[in-house]
Amino acid sequence: MATGQDRCPIWAIPEPADRKPGYSREQIARAALRIADAEGFEAVTMKRIAAGLGAATMTLYYYVRGKADVVALMQDAILAEILIPGDEFPADWRDAVTAIARRTRQVLMAHPWSLSSLNDAQFGPNAARHFEQSIAATAGTGLPAAARLELIAAVDDYVAGNALHGAESLARARAAEADPGLVAATVAYWRGHLQAADFPELTALYGASASTGDEPPAPPMTEDSLRAQFERGLTALLDGIAAAMNIS
């Protein structure tokens, strides 16, 4: 039968401090993050985490109840990276929203697996701190609460989507670099479809480039080009929000 402690979030359970040799939940989270960053989220197991810490697997259960707690700690550790130090937090609403968006994208791109693997994680203290910073960033807009939350949601959605597509693009770029033969075969396949005008809009787009001698348009595939695209999109989004919501 489940107890009250079984149902409560990990944050509500005091962290043990009397075991020797001692570990902390932060150490457990960091060990799990190192595994996920190197090998993917699927590689994160209690056994692997324990090995990374130089501990016996059962030792971890003194600090956490199971993998769900570890996942919550992992998400909270990532959100800690997103937080902007107080002395660096801009006063202007737009500068503050931009700073949070940039930091969030940077961290998500550093942990690309997190975009699809932490959806069931319990929200922890750093999730609340991140949301607090987002609310503080919009304080200078003069908007009512509902509109401020809508602004935050719009930016969050843009950042998460951009990071997801960016991570996919970089993964495809790495795969292409590792197997140029596959790239050549893929290009040849699609060139045939373009020449046959199976996709008239694409054919016209690439035909226009060929007639002017320009490079054919292509999606960004490097971190620099992806970051530049993100900045342009963020500027356009905030311009649109400011105009639609009458924010000065």
Image: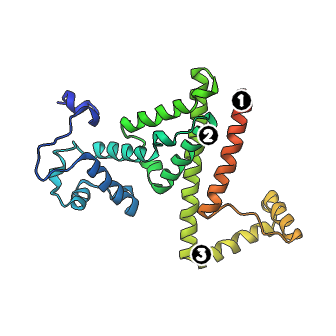
Q: Residue at x 74, y 71 (%)?
A: 191
Query: What residue type is disc 2 on?
Result: Asp
Residue 65 on image: x %, y %:
21, 42
Q: Please report whichever mark, 2 or 1, sits nearer to the chain's N-terminal start.
A: 2
Q: Mark 2 points at which residue?
A: 95
Residue found at x 32% / y 53%: 30
**Earlier sequence position, callout 3 versus callout 2:** 2
Crowding near pointer 2: few (<14 within 10 Å), some, many (20+)?
A: few
Q: Type of residue at label 3?
A: Leu
Q: How is the image coloured?
A: rainbow
Q: In this view, does 6 lie to the left or right of 107?
A: left
Residue depicted at x 58% and y 35%: 91
Q: In which quarter of the image is residue 57?
A: bottom left
Q: Is residue 52 visible?
A: yes
The image's mark for residue 248 is 1
The residue that mark 3 highlights is 182
Q: Nearer the viewer, mark 3 or mark 2?
A: 2
At mark 2, the secondary structure is helix
**The C terminus, quarter of image:** top right
Task: Assess disc 3: are there few (<14), some (14-19) or many (≥20) residues with their C-alpha within 10 Å of its C-alpha.
Answer: few
Amino acid type of the residue that numbered disc 1 sits on in the rendered structure = Ser
